[in-house]
């Protein structure tokens, strides 16, 4: 069984106001077997869509190569927008060498609530996935339950929005975005909102749909 440990420390800084929260990158980032086009940073997979989406929203003109400059491009963007990254999974065991959330076993979680206490300007968590088993929202709910905290629904439309009170006077909102992965394309295709847009414009695709969704929250 493969021990899949997260290869990156959380990317956090004093001015952080929003946190991107996922699970684990593909195993090759942990085994250091990156392929051409991968960027050695959070969500740096050449096959992933998060940075492609952000590139379109903000016209970033990013480099897609395994270089220090490509990493710095992304870090500089995050600092300018006051966005941090703190994936919720520290490590998990896998029978198969893939990146599926369902395939994770013996999951060890990061102390995400501790990070929220340490960075008091954070007011929004941007989950890169929803409440399906082992998804970031699902695992975060486990953390809250341990502390006797609960999430209150604000909107149950996709993307679902919740909020919780971390401490007196501090309310934090969570946004469960449609996962920026090819595996989620089937789910996007079944959404009525996507189907309506596709009917109006046959060239509209699942990445276009995510760009529209993410733009409202980044």
Image: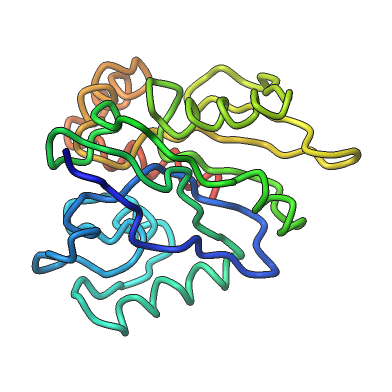
Is residue 53 positioned above or below 146 on the image?
below
Q: Could you tell whether 34 is left or right of 173 in the image?
A: left
Residue at figure coordinates x 22%, y 57% from the top left: 45
Q: Could you tell whether 96 is left or right of 185 in the image?
A: left
In the orientation shown, which residue stands out farthest toward the front? 1
Is residue 201 positioned above or below 66 on the image?
above
Total marks placed? 0
Quarter of the image that includes the N terminus: top left
In the orientation shown, which residue stands out farthest toward the right? 168
Residue at figure coordinates x 44%, y 27% from the top left: 130
Tell me which corner region of the image, top left, top right, bottom left or bottom right, holds residue 189.
Answer: top left
Tell me which corner region of the image, top left, top right, bottom left or bottom right, holds residue 212.
Answer: top left
Q: Could you tell whether 2 is left or right of 89 in the image?
A: left
Q: How is the image coloured?
A: rainbow
Q: Position of residue 16 (x, y in %)?
A: 65, 62
The front one of 45 and 114 is 114
Q: Could you tell whether 181 is left or right of 14 in the image?
A: left
Residue at figure coordinates x 67%, y 23% from the top left: 151
Is residue 121 positioned above or below 193 on the image?
below
The front one of 190 and 181 is 181
Q: Position of residue 97 (x, y in %)?
A: 13, 42
In the orientation shown, which residue stands out farthest toward the bottom? 69
Residue at figure coordinates x 34%, y 51% from the top left: 50
Q: Position of residue 195 (x, y in %)?
A: 28, 19
């Amino acid at each position: 069984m493969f021990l899949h440990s997260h290869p990156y420390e959380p990317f956090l800084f004093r001015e952080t106001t929003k946190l991107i929260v996922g699970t684990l990158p593909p195993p090759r980032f942990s085994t250091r077997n990156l392929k051409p086009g991968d960027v050695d940073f959070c969500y740096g997979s050449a096959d992933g869509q998060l940075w492609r989406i952000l590139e379109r929203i903000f016209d970033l003109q990013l480099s897609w190569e395994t270089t220090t400059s490509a990493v710095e491009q992304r870090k500089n963007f995050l600092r300018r927008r006051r966005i941090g990254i703190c994936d919720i999974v520290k490590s998990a065991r896998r029978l198969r060498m893939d990146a599926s959330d369902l395939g994770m076993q013996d999951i060890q979680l990061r102390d995400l609530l501790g990070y929220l206490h340490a960075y008091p300007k954070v007011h929004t968590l941007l989950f890169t996935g929803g409440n399906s088993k082992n998804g970031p929202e699902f695992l975060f709910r486990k953390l809250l339950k341990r502390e006797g905290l609960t999430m209150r629904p604000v909107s149950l439309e996709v993307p679902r929005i919740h909020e919780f009170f971390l401490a007196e006077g501090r309310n934090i909102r969570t946004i469960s975005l449609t996962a920026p992965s090819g595996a989620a394309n089937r789910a996007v295709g079944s959404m009525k909102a996507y189907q309506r847009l596709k009917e109006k414009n046959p060239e509209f695709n699942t990445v276009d749909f995510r760009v529209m969704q993410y733009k409202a929250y980044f």
